[in-house]
Image: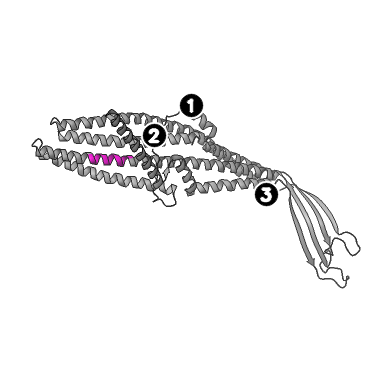
Amino acid sequence: MRNGIAAAGLLGCVLAGCAGVLAQSGAAGGKPVVTLDEAIQRAEANEPVFAGMKADSQAAGLDRWIARTTLLPNAVYHNQAIYTQSGSELGANSPKFIAGNGVHEYMSQAVVNETAGLVQVAGVRRADAVAARAAAELEVARRGLVAAVTGLYYGELAAERKLAIAEQAQTEAAGFTGLTGKRENAREAAHADVVKAELLEQQRDRELGDARLGAEKAHLELGVLLFADPRTEYALAAGGEAAELPTLEAVEEATGKSNPELKSALEGLKASQADVLGARAAYLPELGLNLTYGIDAPQFAVNGPDHLSNMGYSASVTLDLPVWDWLATHGKVRQSEIRRDAAKVALTSAQRRLIAQLEETYGEASVAREQLASLDRSVATAAESLRLTKMRYAEGEGTVLEVVDAQASYVDVANAQEDGRVRYEVARAQLEALAGRL
């Protein structure tokens, strides 16, 4: 007999396990299960503002490469044919225009130009700073998107749990209505208890409808960032226990090393300093170099009629010295210095704002973590209170109002627990974003 019971138990466990596996595979096969990391990756690919920031960063990187090409010589292959009216009184091969070298003139030349000056150096420095700032702004946008997706992700999980709480509360209310009816039929309770229970059940029905609507809204809001069609059916990977909060010292150390807001402000200051350098460069001389090699002859040929080579070269060096521009350069330098001073103020403001934001966010996360632990205890206490109150009422020792209050207390504290979990996860995500860990 014992062997039969054991075999039956083992068979039941196997069948239950197989059923669980099949149910899990069916759920996964019916609609995709999205983790938080996958949700972030999908949002980065679908969110238009982030896509625009990414495009700006890539364009700024190309601007930096283009600016560096100004430090190098450029080459062109120049081709030109000039036909000028001949002056018959001067000879058949004499041009009518004094500027013409001949009636027919052909040029086919390779030309290399190089301009050396402080303006080009300042342009490269500015392009480097702008590209670095665009990369920092992209990181700011990415971390903001991560925090937003985290909030929507845990918000939908909370909405789903609140829907389960509302369904449980509606079932409890319906069961309590049946209990009061049985007690009234047994002449153990007044009809007023039945009326009160029915009112409670109606209220729970309305709350269930609101919870179902809230879950649908949360599903659509996150679906907008994840799929081409926000109505796509998907499931979220259930979160486990809330992650531990890192120490304030560890967060401060990580934030000081990799905060994009500070990086953006610092690169903005570097760009303004490069503008000052570029404006002051107008006070200095500019050197131009030119090398030309090719044909400039009456015939489009390597050799002329006299079998002499038409190929030749020329080189020139130009040095432009600024003398007077009616103080325009002075005004441009002053403009750039004013913008540089404003960039310094922005940098110090970003530093102060980061310190305050770090303290505020860590304080928010700490309080949310403490309250989450307290809410867990409150849910357990409210559930036990509801169980005992229903037992007392069933035995005729409690009142209907005590049961109604116990049910309301349990629903309120269970919903508050979900709100507290979202609050903590969002605050922790913001803190991890400040530290550059997301």
Say whether marks 1 and 2 touch (CB < 8 Å). no
Q: Position of residue 248 (x, y in %)?
A: 46, 27
The verdict on residue 293 being magenta is: no
At mark 1, the secondary structure is: helix
Tell me, for residue 326, which label it has, or none: 3
Q: Which residue is mark 1?
A: 249
| Residue in the foreground of this view, choosing between 326 and 195 | 195
Report the Cα–Cα distance between label 1 and label 2: 26 Å
Q: Position of residue 185 (x, y in %)?
A: 9, 39
The verdict on residue 167 being magenta is: yes
Instruction: Mark 3 vs mark 2: give the one in front.
Output: 2
User: In the displayed structure, would residue 96 be above or below residue 32?
Assistant: below
Tell me, for residue 378, which label it has, or none: none
Disc 3: CA contacts within 10 A as few (<14), some (14-19) or many (>=20)? few
Q: Which residue is mark 2?
A: 240
Report the Cα–Cα distance between label 1 and label 3: 56 Å
Mark 3 and mark 2 lie on one chain; the one further toward the N terminus is 2
The region drawn magenta spans 161-171
Question: Along the horizontal axis of the image, is 364 left or right of 88?
Answer: left
